[in-house]
Image (spheres, helix red, strand yellow):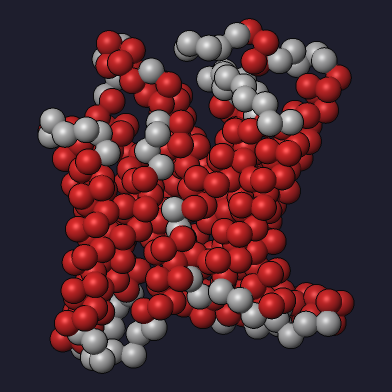
Amino acid sequence: MSGETPADDGDPSRPDRGLRRTAELAGIGVTGVVAAAMLGFVLLYWAQDLPVASDLYAAFRSFGRGMDAAFGTNVFRHPIMWQSMAVGVLVGVVAPLVGSFLVHREMALIGETLAHTAFAGVAIGILVTSSTGWNGSLLLVALAVGIVGALVVQWLTERTDAYGDVPIAIMLSGSFAVGTLIISYGDGLTGVNIEGYLFGNLAVVTPEGARLMGMLSLIVVAGVALTYKQLLFITFDEQAARVAQLNVTGYNTLLVVLTAVVVVGAMQVLGVILVAAMLVVPVAAASQIARSFRETVYLSVIFGQLSVIGGFAVSIGLGLPSGGSIVVTAIAVYLASIVGSGFSVKAISAHG
């Protein structure tokens, strides 16, 4: 890759390099433990009536009351807050994970596009609910519409002669227009808080939504882990990947579908308007100080987690919307990374 030098990878035997790698792995380890704990809570909440699970769930509730006593709050004893935090923590993992590939492929806009497509899915779900009395999950409808939208974007990009971002821009404005028309047509027919889906709201997260996010997170992490080398190849040299007869179209489609999956899950706490920020801002922060693509992935996940936890603290402490609090915290992390990097610009190595 042009602009890449052997020094980009660093020497693992150097003390500063070894300390840096240890700190990154420790951060990833802590993030993994927190995410696993949140997944555990979602599972316990679902299975709380079973004999063993009920005891563990009671212990978790006691732990929450202890946290309230320690911090002087009245938050952690409520299951609804834990399931909201579980969704946020999982978003802090999977959004930067997928966003690392999108940012380096200059496809950051696609996250915003699929968020608007998912909003159209929510609108369709609301209309179906109001017209038929169906009581299913709006998120499942949004997920289905979001995946279809991802496939349409990929199809348009592959088969039109327009500039690369033109189909994405058309889909972005078109899907949001469809969503607003449907919402206006069905205005007053349901009691759904549409502003919660637009701007993010902890109250939007339901037990079903938390379980869906848990399942989707496992799918995204597994998908990236199993296809990491292929996604890395097409990210940094798509033409060479085609020459090597790699199924570039298939992996591009996989990436946009994974993006749609992340967007639908993240929409619960970030809202349609702000969801794309978690795909981009932690990755931008990591890129300021990372020396390789793998290091960018590690740091973006760590920064994403810091943004979510810090944002929840601001939201709960000041009674502010969760989406804006998380994004503002992420931007603060980004600015801090610029200061910490000494305003330097480095080439990112695809190795290491």
Residue 86, quarter of picture: bottom right
Percent coordinates x, y for residue 68 in the rendering: 79, 80
Q: Nearer the viewer, residue 333 or 17?
A: 333
Q: Nearer the viewer, residue 69 or 269?
A: 269
Specify the quadrant that holds the C terminus: top right
Residue 133, quarter of picture: bottom left
Percent coordinates x, y for residue 344 in the rendering: 67, 26
**Residue 88 located left or right of residue 272:** right
Residue 118, quarter of picture: bottom left
Percent coordinates x, y for residue 28 in the rendering: 68, 42
Q: Nearer the viewer, residue 114 or 67?
A: 114
Q: Residue drawn at (48%, 11%), measured in percent from left and top? A: 2
Q: How many marks?
A: 0
Whether residue 252 can be seen here = yes
**Residue 48 located left or right of residue 71:** left
Q: Residue drawn at (33%, 20%), measured in percent from left and top? A: 238
**Residue 145 located left or right of residue 218:** left
